Structure formats: structure tokens, C-alpha cells
Image (cartoon, helix red, strand yellow):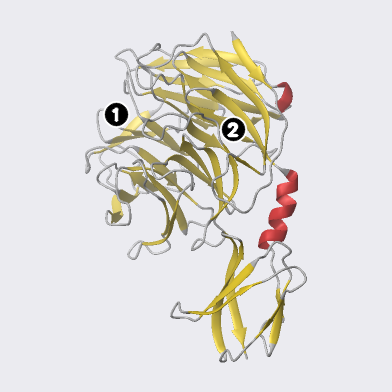
Amino acid sequence: MNRILLIIGASLIITNQNYAQLNTNLLFHWDDSTLVGSNAYNNTYNEIWGLNINGSEIAIIGSTAGTHFFDVTNPTNSNQIAFIAGAYTGPGVIHRDYHDFDDYLYIVCDEGSSSTLQIVDISNLPNSVNTVYDSNNLFNKAHNIFIDTATAKLYACAVSNAMDVYSLHIADNPSLIYSYNDVGHVHDAFVRNDTAFLNCGNDGLRIMDFTMVNTLGDQPVELASFTSYPDAGYNHSGWLNSDGTIYAMQDENHGYDIKILDVSDYNNISVLSTFNSGVDTNSMAHNGIIKDNLLYVAYYHDGLRVFDISDPFNPNQVNSYDTYLPNNHNSYKGAWGVYPYLISGNILVSDMQSGLYIIELNTTSTDIKKELFNTYIYPNPILSSFKISNPFATSIKIYDISGRIILDKKITINNNTINRKGIKNGLYIYKLYNNNFLIKSDKIIFN
């Protein structure tokens, strides 16, 4: 039977990173107890995807049985509107993956000799869907897919080759244009305007230019190889920000941090920061997506974790919702995927054990975050003293350009004036905290 849970609740905590629920409302939860779990960790569900189509919002979640479509336009009244059985089903299924292009949804599975590439006409949603292609002529199994919608190319990861590239100029009839085998395999990819960020497992990150790859025989150009970095493990997945300068990357190893990379210069890629959910030393990030200045991460065992990366040197956790209990961090259970691109702003999360979640980032928390991060220090430049406008600030630290702390002071709403106390003229960095929570880091000038 289907188990549907409707909950509206809120929590606001800004003093501890180890949250079960922070600034979120659960709007809808679906779990079908009749579906079988997989042979690996009893995982029933896998990837999540979303659509904004024909004025409706659609959630798509994979299971051991196939692909489930939900109309989530009115999230508290969400309902399953379509289902497409997988070509391969049952407890052998662990991975399905999705991407859409030109009114078609592309579906792959990474298990089973009978698996196929499925292409589904979604143009009539939320009323109906229609499978227009279901074949293994191109490939049988794929671990992940990514579609560069700007150039109509589909990247199929970990097929019989490390990665195959297909033209989608005829959207329902892909054609192979390149097979990539310079590494053992490509686990996942993010591609924009023919620039592909390839997560190559133990071979690290590769950045490739596929501009000139349009027919069989064309060759890509390698732009960068990045293999030496903190917590380098199994390079699993990543996402590029909108201006192409920041790349968030997850290595799928217990206890390994998320990395924020500066990729503005492919000849000089650097790690700007590393961070984690703050829950357990064995916590593991799975899949992440950047939207605006927020990084949305599906964390095994720790659920949805949202980080403000507007300051990429100092990411801050600003929202969370734990979808999985108990938290035995030694296994591979819990949240699999996240989708933050619905027009409503609601967040879709898939949990391998417990299904589909629709989560709202608390509107109150949005106001709080504005106050948290829109901090004013005035005057700036500073002559003799300055004030801090943020009502949540409990302390401030000021660093010189060598990183040495020159001021460390507690503050309150009623005692928020800071005297210069002999600080020399120059440029400094301040960090403002609410207890252990970093609110903001920015430049400050003393004249």
C-alpha cells in the first residue's frame, strides 16, 4: 500500500551544525510499501528529477520497479499520475538516472541484462506520458546520464565504454558521435556548452572540451586534469555554478568533505574550502546541485543539507532535513538525490529507504537568512569605532592579511560598538559569528 504523509512543521536553529531539521517544512512524503528493496542495503528508491511543464510541477523518482511521476504543483495534495515500468525490475536494481530535453525524458538503469535506454514523451504532462523508445541498440546499461541542452548532446556514463556521447538533434533517435576511454570509467558528468566536468572515480576530475565533437571521428580536447586535492577519494559527482567559476565536488567516501573549487582558470584549479554536514565523522555526501548561491546536497544518512556558498571560502549550512533514521553511517542508506529547480522553490529529495520528500525552505528562515547575511558594518572605512547591524551576532574576529587574529570580541544587540583599540591603518578581514555559526566574512578597512 502507498504510505503518504502530510506534515507542515518548522524549526529554526542557528547555533549548532548538527541539526535534524533546520529552517525547513516537510510538505509531502510518499513511500510505497509494496515495492521490493534491492539486494544492496535494501534500497527501494534511487534518483530524483523534476519538471516545470505546462504550468505544472512534476516530481520523478526511480524505484526497483521503474519510474514514478507525481504532480506536485499543489504539494500537500501531490499524487502519482503516471508510472513506467523499467525494462529490468526487482531486487537487482540499484541505480536509475534521468534527464530531460525537448519534451522528452531519458531514463537509464545500471543493472540487468535486459535494461534499455527509455525515451518518454512528456509533452502532455500532467495528463499522460508516452514511451517512444525502449531499446538496448545504443547501450544496455548506464550509471548516469547528463544532457547538454545547449548543444543537444547526451553523455552516457559508465556504459561499455568509460563514457559515450550521443547527438540529440533528433531527440527521440540519439546517434553515437564519440566514445571516451582515457580513464577507467566516468561515474558522472556535468556539461555546459560543450565543456564537460567528468567525475572519474579513482582517476579524479577531468575537464574536456567537446565543441568539435559532432560526428564519429571528431576528437575532444582535454582542458584540465585534477587529481591531487584534500580528501581525494572516489570522485563521484559535481555541479558548476551559473557563471562557471565555482565547482562543488563530492568524493563518495565515508568521512570525506565536499570541496569547493575555483575553476575560473583551468590551468590553476584550486580548492577554496572543504566542509561537511557536521553530523558524524563517517558522513558522506552523495549528490549535489548548485542553484544561485546555494548548494543543495543529498547526504547519505543525513538527508537534505543546504549550504550558502556566496562566500566560497566560508560555506555555511543554512537548511537541513534528515530523511533517514537510524543514522548508522557505515552503510550506504538514506538520501540519494535532490532537485531544487521547481519554479515554486520547493525542494525534491529521494531517500533510498523511504521514498519521495517535498521540502519547503521555511519562509521565516528566508527572512532570518537575509538578516544573517546582509550584515552592515558601519562606518567602513573606520576611523575610531564601528557598529554591527546584525541582531544575531555574538562575536567578531578581525584578521590581518597574513591570517593573524588581531581582535576577538563578544558582542550583543545592546553592546555592538567596537572600538579600534590601536589597530593600524590597512585592509583586514572580519568574521562574524553566532556562537559557532559563521554568519559572514568580508573586507574591512581602517583609515
Image quarter hosting the C terminus? bottom right
Q: Secondary structure at mark 2?
A: strand
Q: Which residue is mark 1?
A: 159
**Label 1 packing within 10 angstroms: few (<14), some (14-19), many (20+):** many
Residue nearer the viewer, 397 or 3: 397
Residue nearer the viewer, 135 or 112: 112
Tell me the residue at 69%/67% (across/down).
375
Q: CA distance from mark 1 to mark 2?
A: 27 Å
Can you tell which mark lies on residue 283?
none
Residue nearer the viewer, 201 or 334: 334
Give the image location of residue 435, x and y in percent. 60, 60
Image quarter hosting the N terminus? top right
Q: In the rendered structure, which amino acid carries the disc numbered 2?
A: Leu
Can you tell which mark lies on residue 348?
2
Answer above or below: position of 78 versus 395.
above
Tell me the residue at 46%/13% (across/down).
65
Give the image location of residue 146, x and y in percent. 43, 36
Give the image location of residue 271, x and y in percent. 39, 60
Answer above or below: position of 407 versus 305.
below
